[in-house]
Image (cartoon, rainbow, N blue to C red):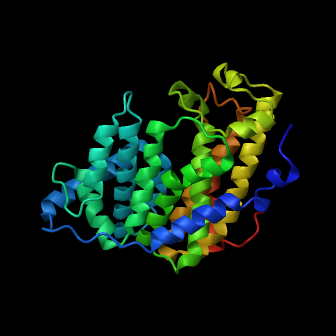
Amino acid sequence: MPPSSATRNPALVQGWEEWIVARALRASSTTPFPAPDPEPSPALVREAVRWCHRVSSTFSRTFHLASALLPAPQRSAIRVLYAFCRTADELLDAATPDLTVFRAWRVLALSDHFPRAEPVLLAFSLVRARYRIPSGYVRDFLDGVALDLTRTRYDTFDELARYCYGVASTVGLMSMHILGFTGPEAISYAVRLGVALQLTNILRDVGEDLRRGRIYLPRTELRDYGVPESHLLEARVDPAWRAFMRFQVDRTRALYRSALPGIRYLHPRGRTAVATAAVLYEGILDAIEHLGYDVFRHRATVGPLRRAVLLARALRVSRNPNAPEP
């Protein structure tokens, strides 16, 4: 049986959000990292930053495009942050991820000293100090991505939302310190946007994750819609699966809608970039629908023409985040 009307309406179910926002507020009050001592040479810094920019341009067209809309200092810092997060993901997405290797890298990532042999960590050590990124956000992110080493299933949406906070909302919260924001009132919006972005990744990558032995979709909701795990393994696209995915897409879309008004709490220089990233990612949900929810055999992408339309929408949103959609 599909979920009740309360579950269908994401605005009526906020228990998961209360827990996450409370955690984010606690993390926001943690001590920022100090500047690395001794300071690395300018030549070493330039090479490390160039490396991070290459990571950004190689692995995420959407992110790289959105960050291009920022002033140069923030653009560079955001791309360093992306490279840091991507490197952590890559360590855990390897064919045979090694917890010992990740733990050693985590120690370096949280160290007060920059590691010369790690260009991403070197560049990130400067960014986190310059923009006073709370150490709690970095720790929560590293704890979140580490879950992929030990957990391959989630029973409830609350559990999944907490995972999304760890791997995605924390990135948005760190980004806010780079872009500039008015105060703690921005935190709940960043949490929602991060959860929406990660849910979009999860819905798009169902087939890829299955091949890695992972199912992020909440088990209780799969059962509610009559979708057993065996149907996922068979890549079965039937009415039950489509109904389940329709609910997932609707909930994720609602999260984007409730997160975008928070753009007004960002410094004006960062609003267009964040709106662009959000609107382009939300466009992936449209692509999933156009595939008939067959995310087992196809990867949902946003084509160039559609991207141009969405960029125009992102500009409208950044100028007036509270305006209703046409």
Of 177 and 304, nearer the camera is 177
Q: Quadrant of residue 122?
A: bottom left
Residue toward you, 285 or 23? 23
Residue 13 left/right relative to 162: right
- The answer to whether residue 126 is visible is yes
Q: Considering the image in quadrants, where does the N terminus appear? A: top right
Residue ID at (70%, 60%): 15
Q: Position of residue 294 (x, y in %)?
A: 69, 29
Q: Nearer the viewer, residue 6 or 249?
A: 6
* Count of marks overlaid on the render: 0
Q: Position of 266 compared to 235: left or right?
A: left
Instruction: Examine the image and state in which quarter residue 136 appears.
Output: bottom left
**Residue 257: x, y in percent?**
70, 61
Where residue 2 sits: x, y (%)?
84, 40
Residue at the spot x=65%, y=53% of the render? 309
Q: Is residue 49 shown to the viewer in this render?
A: no
| 76 in relation to 98, above or below | below
Residue furthest toward the bottom? 182
Q: Is residue 100 above or below residue 138?
A: above
96 over 65 or under it: above or below: above
Q: Residue at x 66, y 40 (%)?
A: 155
Quadrant including the C terminus: bottom right
Nearest the viewer among 41 and 67 is 41
Q: Is residue 50 above or below residue 38?
A: above
Residue 262 in the image, given as x and y percentages of width and height: 62, 71
In the displayed image of the protein, which residue is found farthest to the top? Answer: 234
